């Protein structure tokens, strides 16, 4: 692989570049550089992020091949000269250069390209005398193949290879390290496996923190997770909550199993990327195997979906469960119907921040089979649907789960508390974090999009930019300060000074 000794030698025609951390991955310490004018600032930012995440600020750069497939080969080598290539994984669907969906095998490369990649990975491992499990990564665009890197470790996505090849890579890696010999040939692959990464993040890919009130993933899937119901998700670690993996005899079967498990999962307390994962798994482009690294980019096949509004029956179930809870908890007159009025012509309704629903009288065609504080069974057009309802101390939301999906609703109090007023032009912290740098001072003139300060959260840098041209009228934070989500960081007075 040709290597330049200095980034100063990169010719203009060789841009764009991708600056990457040498000591690790996961999207940390990675920056896209489109021209030489951006290089110094982006390298410095990547170094800081790499140092914070891995304790090593060493970075390197490589050509950026855009809208290509990200394909990697799993290798396993022993001390006796045997090197296995356990097929390839496709990891093209990414956000912020961090993988979101991985599968084995790739749905979009030819047998000839597969053979070429596996042979190259085996040659690389032999050339350096590698022992253990590792991954050799490539970008593939048509007939063009570009080498990316070799990760000398197990990858997050190794379970899809384990399911397709019927091996335990963790066990084999340990046995090889103890001197065991591998059989001459690896097992034959069978079926298809797909893995999704469940992140604690919102639709803008911003990390979310708080208490994970409930974490239950049902179905015929494998779940590798470091959290459980009641876990606290802090800003000090990666936003990854779990890897959820499905295996099928066909790719379509694996995708269907995975989508079903995600719909039926009970995930309460923290916003996750579940809706995005479902959007991907059910999209026409994904099911056709038309995936590349631009899949989630603006204008790509799938963009981050807006928060999904609860459907009418989910909202109705929440209202009926709240009414049942009110009747149960009533200190007196327990037999009096909840929401009772002298004027019977007035319907009983429940207001949520997301929607409003009338539950007495019921909507046409809907019948209540059961209504309890934690379970509601509704029938519409002869079809019965159970709805599980949950509330938690310290959490205002009502969580409704059903086989068709889940929703979180926030009841609107009858006597709302006063809302704290925020000055126009206020820049608010989108998540809890630490102020890494303040780029402006009070009185400075700024242009729209100009960085005002940088927050660090979950080992990632997040730039806070001016929303429009204006003047900095106030800066409320300083370097190193810890801030909560929603805190006012600075105020920009729009317009000319």
Image (cartoon, rainbow, N blue to C red):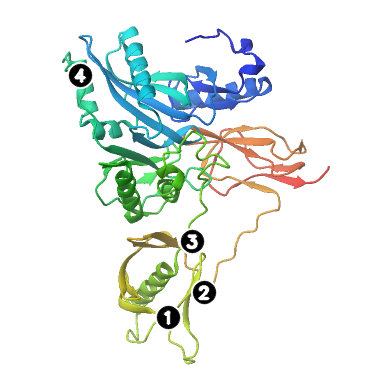
Residue 346 vs 317, above or below: the answer is below
Residue at 26% x, 45% y: name it. Answer: 221
Distance from Cα at disc 4 to Cα at disc 2:
69 Å
Q: Where is residue 432 shown, x and y percent of the image?
A: 51, 43
Secondary structure beneath label 3: loop
Residue at 65% x, 42% y: name it. Answer: 476
Q: Which residue, given by chain and number where applicable, does mark 3 sit on?
A: 309
10 Å neighbourhood of mark 3: few (<14), some, or many (≥20)? some
Q: Is residue 90 visible?
A: yes
Residue at 16% x, 18% y: name it. Answer: 183
Q: Is residue 128 visible?
A: no
Residue at 38% x, 27% y: name it. Answer: 110
Q: Where is residue 92 shown, x and y percent of the image?
A: 44, 33
Secondary structure beneath label 1: loop
10 Å neighbourhood of mark 4: few (<14), some, or many (≥20)? few
Counting residues from the start of the chain, the first of labels 4 and 3 encountered is: 4
Q: Where is residue 274 shown, x and y percent of the image?
A: 41, 49
Distance from Cα at disc 4 to Cα at disc 3:
52 Å
Badge nearest the viewer, 4 or 1: 4
Badge nearest the viewer, 3 or 1: 1
Secondary structure beneath label 2: loop
454 sits to left or right of 406: right
Q: Which residue, given by chain and number where applicable, does mark 1 sit on?
A: 364
Distance from Cα at disc 3 to Cα at disc 1:
21 Å
Counting residues from the start of the chain, the first of labels 2 and 1 encountered is: 1
Q: Where is residue 391 shown, x and y percent of the image?
A: 37, 63
Secondary structure beneath label 4: loop
Q: Which residue, given by chain and number where applicable, does mark 2 sit on?
A: 414
């Amino acid at each position: 692989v040709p290597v330049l000794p200095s980034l100063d030698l990169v010719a203009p025609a060789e841009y764009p570049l991708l600056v990457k951390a040498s000591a690790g991955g996961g999207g940390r310490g990675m920056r896209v550089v489109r021209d030489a004018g951006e290089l110094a600032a982006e390298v410095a930012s990547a170094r800081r992020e790499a140092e914070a995440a891995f304790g090593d600020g060493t970075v390197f750069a490589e050509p950026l091949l855009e809208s290509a497939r990200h394909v990697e080969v799993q290798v396993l080598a022993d001390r006796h000269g045997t090197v296995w290539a356990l097929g390839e994984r496709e990891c093209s669907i990414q956000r912020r250069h961090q993988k979101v969906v991985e599968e084995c095998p790739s749905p979009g490369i030819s047998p000839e390209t597969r053979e070429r990649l596996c042979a190259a990975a085996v040659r690389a491992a032999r050339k350096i005398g590698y022992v253990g499990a590792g991954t050799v990564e490539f970008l593939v665009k048509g007939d063009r193949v570009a080498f990316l890197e070799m990760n000398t470790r197990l990858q997050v996505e190794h379970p899809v290879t384990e399911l397709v090849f019927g091996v335990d890579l963790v066990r084999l890696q340990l046995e090889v390290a103890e001197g065991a010999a591998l059989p001459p040939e690896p097992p034959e692959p069978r079926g298809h496996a797909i893995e999704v990464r469940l992140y604690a993040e919102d639709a803008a890919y911003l990390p979310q923190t708080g208490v994970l009130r409930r974490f239950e993933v049902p179905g015929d899937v494998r779940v590798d997770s470091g959290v459980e119901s009641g876990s606290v998700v802090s800003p000090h670690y990666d936003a990854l909550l779990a890897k959820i993996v499905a295996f099928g005899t066909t790719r379509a079967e694996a995708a269907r199993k995975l989508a079903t498990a995600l719909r039926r999962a009970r995930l309460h307390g923290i916003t996750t990327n579940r809706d995005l994962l479902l959007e991907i798994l059910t999209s026409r482009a994904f099911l056709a195997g038309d995936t590349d690294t631009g899949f989630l980019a603006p204008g790509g096949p799938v963009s981050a979906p807006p928060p999904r509004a609860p459907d009418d029956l989910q909202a109705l179930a929440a209202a009926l469960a709240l009414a049942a809870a009110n009747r149960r908890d009533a200190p007196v007159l327990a037999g009096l119907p909840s929401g009772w009025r002298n004027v019977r012509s007035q319907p009983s309704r429940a207001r949520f921040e997301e929607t409003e629903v009338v539950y007495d009288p019921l909507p046409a065609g809907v019948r209540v089979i059961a209504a309890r504080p934690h379970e509601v069974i509704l029938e519409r057009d002869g079809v019965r649907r159970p709805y599980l309802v949950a509330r938690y101390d310290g959490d205002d939301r009502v969580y409704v789960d059903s086989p068709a999906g889940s929703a979180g609703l926030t009841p609107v109090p009858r006597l709302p508390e006063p809302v704290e007023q925020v000055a126009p032009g206020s820049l608010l912290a989108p998540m809890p974090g630490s102020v890494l740098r303040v780029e402006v001072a009070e009185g400075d003139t700024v242009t729209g999009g100009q960085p005002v300060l940088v927050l660090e959260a979950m080992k990632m840098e997040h730039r806070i930019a001016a929303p429009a041209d204006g003047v900095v009228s106030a800066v409320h934070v300083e370097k190193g300060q810890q801030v909560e989500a929603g805190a006012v960081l600075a105020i920009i007075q729009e317009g000319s000074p």
